[in-house]
Image: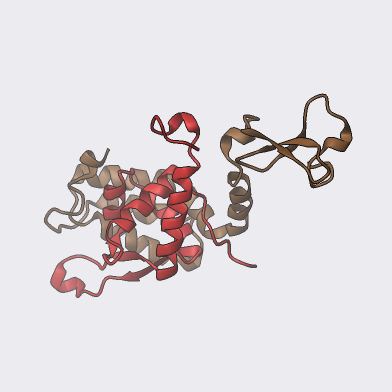
Amino acid sequence: MTAQLGSRGTGQAGRPTWWASLVVRTAALPLPSEHRWRYRQEFLAELYGMTPAEQRHHAIGILSRIWTLCMALTEPERLTHKEATMATPWLCRIGRHRWQRLRNPEGGWYRECRKCGKQRNVPGGPPSMAGPSAGGF
Amino acid sequence: MEQPRTPRMTIPTQLVLHALLTDPTQELYGVEIGTAAGLPSGTVHPILARLETVGWLTSRWEDIDPRAEGRPARRYYQLTPDGLELARAALARAYTARPAWLRPLGEES
């Protein structure tokens, strides 16, 4: 993938084609007003030095992912929620934990995931055999 | 609202950080970062925006005379000193957090 983008920005500086310029200008419209001018200028500046084919590819790529940029700029709290989700290893999220057998202070056994810290009773054991967090979660 | 301190460590985010960590003293603009990271157009700017929001990156307009250069100024990105340390640590964590079946043979968890 790198190879096909390798010549970008390294050619002779030339004006972008009118349609690539129009596409990136239009792409910036959904962005918050305080960021719109900056990204419009940034996208336009990046078109300089590209071949028309590279400009088309670049402009369409920007346009197709403008909502992702919009979300990154406008909803940091949503990002925080996603981070919390992503903090759990994906194998744990689909129930594939890496259990290790541990002993609680009372001498009972329990299991704890090495990756996410989830605790469980040893199968078949009495409730008193739960982990140190008094029943775990 | 308190800003989040750690962005999502998706594979594209890791690739962008790798590209920026190759030479942390060098400033790169969006297309250069995308090329170095091997990411398609449009993918890089949302990642850069998130990294800038959490303070890992700083950006500035290129200091040129647009008339002399024949093109507008580009926006250049660079890791902040804090971002440099946090990015290295995050990439190290991301590497060790790989599932066992993705690690090289013989490597213990």
In the rendered view, how is the structure colored? by chain
Q: Position of residue A85 (x, y in %)?
A: 62, 45
Using the rendered image of the protein, determine whether residue A112 is visible from the camera's viewpoint: yes
Instruction: Name above or below for residue B58 compared with residue B51.
Output: below
Residue farthest to the front?
A107
Q: Quadrant of residue B3?
A: bottom right
- Give me the residue at 45% from left, 56% from top: B89
Near-viewer residue (A40 or A73) = A73
Near-viewer residue (A32 or A11) = A11
Instruction: Name above or below for residue B107 compared with residue B79.
Output: above
- For this view, does B6 lie left or right of residue A7? right
Please name the color used to draw chain A.
brown
- Give me the residue at 30% from left, 46% from top: A58
Q: Position of residue B66 (x, y in %)?
A: 20, 71
Using the rendered image of the protein, determine whether residue B10 is visible from the camera's viewpoint: no
Q: Quadrant of residue B33?
A: bottom left
User: Which image quadrant: the N terminus of chain B?
Assistant: bottom right
Q: Which chain is red?
A: B
Q: Position of residue A103 (x, y in %)?
A: 75, 40
Residue farthest to the top?
A124
- Give me the residue at 29% from left, 59% from top: A44
Q: Quadrant of residue B29?
A: bottom left
Q: Position of residue B73 (x, y in %)?
A: 26, 68
- For this view, does B38 lie left or right of residue A110? left
- For this view, does A113 lie left or right of residue B109? right
Q: How many marks?
A: 0
Near-viewer residue (A32 or A108) = A108
